Amino acid sequence: MAGKRDAVLSPSATRDVAALRRRPDPSEDLVFRPPFFRDADRILHTHAYARYIDKTQVFFNVENDHITHRALHVQLVAKVGRTIGRALGLNEDLIEAIALGHDIGHVPYGHVGEMMLDELSHEHGLDPFRHNVQGVRCLEALEDCNLTLQTLDGILSHDGEGNDLRLAPARIETWEQFDRRVDEARRGGSIVPATFEGCVVRFADSIAYLGRDLEDAIEIGVVDGIEGLPEFCREVFGIGVGESAGIARAVLDVTIKDLVNESFDRPAVGFSDEVAGALRLFKEFNYREIYDNEFLVCEREGIRSMFSDLFERSLLDAGRGDRSSPIYRDHLDVPWLSPAYRDAASPALAARDYIAGMTDRYFNRAVAGCREARGFRPGAV
């Protein structure tokens, strides 16, 4: 049965037999639950995955149940990625595992929260905070899922915010090579995926969020419409002026077909020049009108204060071993946390990991609680 499965895969696809775990799993099954299929299951059953349900995609503190959160986004990326992977003869199980885990490391309040946590990391002598590196840490150090190298590499290298025209895998074969990649990513380096499946997810990430983010922005009134979207983008994606629904579908249809046509039976994955150019202009529009919109930017100082207060309180409680504190109750003393992590984490690292894993709603409650705590003064550590 495994042989029949391999027979329908492209020569570029990652074979199940190539899956590499840090600790060999004697129950590994190449037929009914192959390694990458099992990786997807392990990610689905993590506590970190459950918290996707209330993690901001772009817009925070908005009372609208129709806008995208991380839980929906990773499913969209998985769907887009598997559609492309099926057409190209790639390993769909690996694509799904990478897609479902690729945003595990994101923090409350999205990219704004990541910026604040990175600043606090510098202030407290920690390594820079990178959500892709944190995703690997969540699945290895904190919950110890023993995932394959190929899945973790895809999560590490998933960055969908660049303007890649074409990607060819940068193959690796050992955990030593992977660990060097983690160090490079921690320093801010952009890592090229080691597999074709990882390359597909990187493109699928952009395909999934661009149109959807614009639809969400229109839904809540941050953007009036698409009149400011460059005409070239509207022409390539077939979006008429005045349309506010169906933008994401139009982007998905054009980009998926283009990526498959431009990548089939070729040594790299990528778009045509025309579609790549339209995507670049679309991203520039979204950054200008959405991600850097005053609606989001004006909140940054308040969010900075919230992150700082909560970090200082969590650091104080971890440093003095206050087991009644939420950082112990909801992080350091939970039964599913890796004992090796619990024994080795410094108070500052524990505080950062605790905050990074929060949902937006829990974060808001935790900030309110620490500000109400008797005798607590931010900066008293």
Image: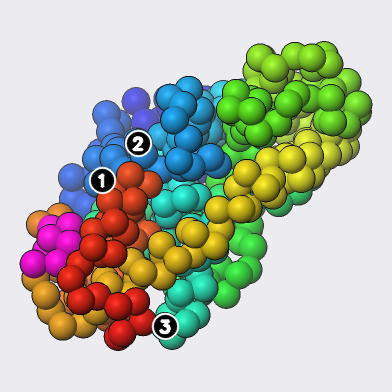
The Cα–Cα distance between marks 1 and 3, rounded to whole angstroms, is 28 Å
Residue at mark 3: 124
Residue 341, located in which quarter of the rendered image? bottom left
State the extent of the magenta-drawn residues as a range: 324-334
Closer to the chain start, of discs 2 and 1, is 1
Residues packed near mark 3 inside 10 Å, few (<14), some (14 to 19) or many (20 plus): few
Amino acid type, callout 2: Ile
Closer to the chain start, of discs 1 and 3, is 1
Residues packed near mark 1 inside 10 Å, few (<14), some (14 to 19) or many (20 plus): some
Q: Residue at x 83, y 39 (%)?
A: 281
The Cα–Cα distance between marks 2 and 3, rounded to whole angstroms, is 30 Å
User: Tags 1 and 3 in contact by the CB under 8 Å rule?
Assistant: no
309 left or right of 222? left
Q: Quadrant of the C terminus?
A: bottom left
Q: Is residue 149 visible?
A: no
Q: Secondary structure at mark 3?
A: loop
Q: Is 263 situated above or below 219?
A: below
Residue at mark 2: 53
Amino acid type, callout 1: Thr
Closer to the chain start, of discs 2 and 3, is 2
Report x, y in % for residue 197: 55, 41
Q: Is residue 308 visible?
A: yes
Q: Secondary structure at mark 1?
A: loop
Main secondary structure along the magenta-highlighted residues = helix
Q: Is 184 situated above or below 319?
A: above
